Image (cartoon, grey):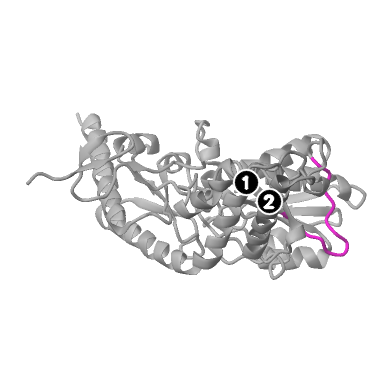
Amino acid sequence: MSAPLRWSRFTWRECPDVPNLPIYLDNHATTRVDPRVVEAMLPHFTMTYGNAASVSHRFGWEAAEAVDRSREQIARLIGAEVQEIILTSGGTESNNLAIKGGLPGLKSRGNHVVTAATEHKSVLDPLKRLAREGWELTVVPPAPDGLISVESIANSLTGRTVLVSIMAANNEVGTLNPIAAIGRLCRARGILFHVDAIQAVGKVPLDVNDDSIDLLSLSAHKIYGPKGVGALFVRRGDPPVRLVPLFDGGGHERGFRSGTVAVPLVVGLGEAAALASLERAEESARLLALRERLHAAIAGRVPAIRLNGHPTLRLPGNLNLSFADVDGEALMMAMRDVAVSSGSACTSANPEPSHVLRAMGVDEAMARASLRFGLGRFTTAEEIDFAADAVARAVMRLRGKNVSADAP
């Protein structure tokens, strides 16, 4: 009997070993929306479709109630208060609002900002723009494993430092930074602490109070929610963090972020946050086991590979490998049935090698020969085995071509 035909969104094909092709292992770029999230969102497109700012009728009241419930779910995930959650269009806006919105109110206290060379471009680019406008910027290099140490941050602080912005988990190599220790350092010095937690939220424990965080960015589409919605935690303490809005018009989100609230998307973010709160520990353990299975299977068949990132202090679903004597783009093209990436999705149009790997001291050739595997909620063991086999076959085939081409 012939193998059953499986449906792929690209084509029909025979595939006896795995449920569907291609296999998706790019969950750091984005995640599939969880069906439970979709179910929660659907009524707010066709039934509860009012504007949450319409206070004069039931349609608006119901929409506002849905937004309030979602805000509670988001706050609960990170240990915040409901009033501390500002809804945004996603991680990039949250990072920009934290930095561009937070610094003007600090100018009387100082003009120095500290960040790391491995930060996402949505942190580095706004800070570099502000540096051109007169702010003093220190960019701390990472250790070879991508870790940003407390000592490196402490050595960068001056009497004029007003903001430190360090990500919780790196989006390319998955390294987890010592956020709680850096937070305590900043709190003791009276320095505002911003954390880009877009990759970490819902995957590792985070608590804005325990970790002494003043501003925290998160995004729905990294935790199986919809694209186009995120949030910024803004501490209400004494004194509270004060932000200058990036744009005006309507005074929504307590004046921090004008614009009609996208109720279905916010409900999706809330449901995704609630699911992450319930399932994070079990899901992380499963992904860690699958990640180690993938690494062992590839390392057992492919020589001359390098693990990028900290060997243990890393996101459970992250595996970043460099393959000697192989071009990463060519390797991805040779694995059409396995969706991976060679770095951040936000810089995929940039032909330069990963700024994260280069900052870690990886040479240009190995940086160009790197692949990022992002495992997620819907990844199966069968898919991991198929992917490991596909990687091994593609690498050895490409190396074989290189050898034969150089032969006399």
Whether residue 123 can be seen here: yes
Task: Please state which of residues 52 and 233 is positioned toward the viewer in this rendering.
Answer: 52
Secondary-structure class at tag 1:
loop
Instruction: Give me the C-alpha separation between circle 1 and circle 2.
Output: 7 Å
Amino acid at the residue labelled 2: Glu
Q: Residue drawn at (67%, 61%), measured in percent from left and top?
A: 72
Whether residue 200 can be seen here: no
Which secondary structure dominates the residues rendered in magenta?
loop
Q: Residue 162 in the image: x percent, y percent? A: 82, 53
> Are discs 1 and 2 less than 8 Å apart at CB?
yes
Per the image, the residue denoted by label 2 is: 62
Task: Please state which of residues 135 and 207 is positioned toward the viewer in this rendering.
Answer: 207
Looking at the rendered image, the quarter that the C terminus falls into is top left
Q: Residue drawn at (30%, 56%), measured in percent from left and top?
A: 299
Q: Residue lying furthest left in this view?
A: 1
Q: Residue 227 in the image: x percent, y percent? A: 56, 42
Q: Is residue 287 left or right of residue 175?
A: left
Above or below, 252 against 315 in this view is above
Q: Is residue 55 left or right of residue 306?
A: right
Q: Residue lying furthest front in this view?
A: 58
Secondary-structure class at tag 2:
helix
Q: Residue 358 in the image: x percent, y percent? A: 53, 44
Q: Which stretch is magenta?
A: 233-245
The image quarter containing residue 369 is top left
Task: Please state which of residues 72 and 380 is positioned toward the viewer in this rendering.
Answer: 72
User: Disc number at residue 48?
Assistant: 1
Confirm whether the magenta stretch covers residue 101. no
Amino acid at the residue labelled 1: Thr
Q: Residue drawn at (6%, 46%), measured in percent from left and top?
A: 1
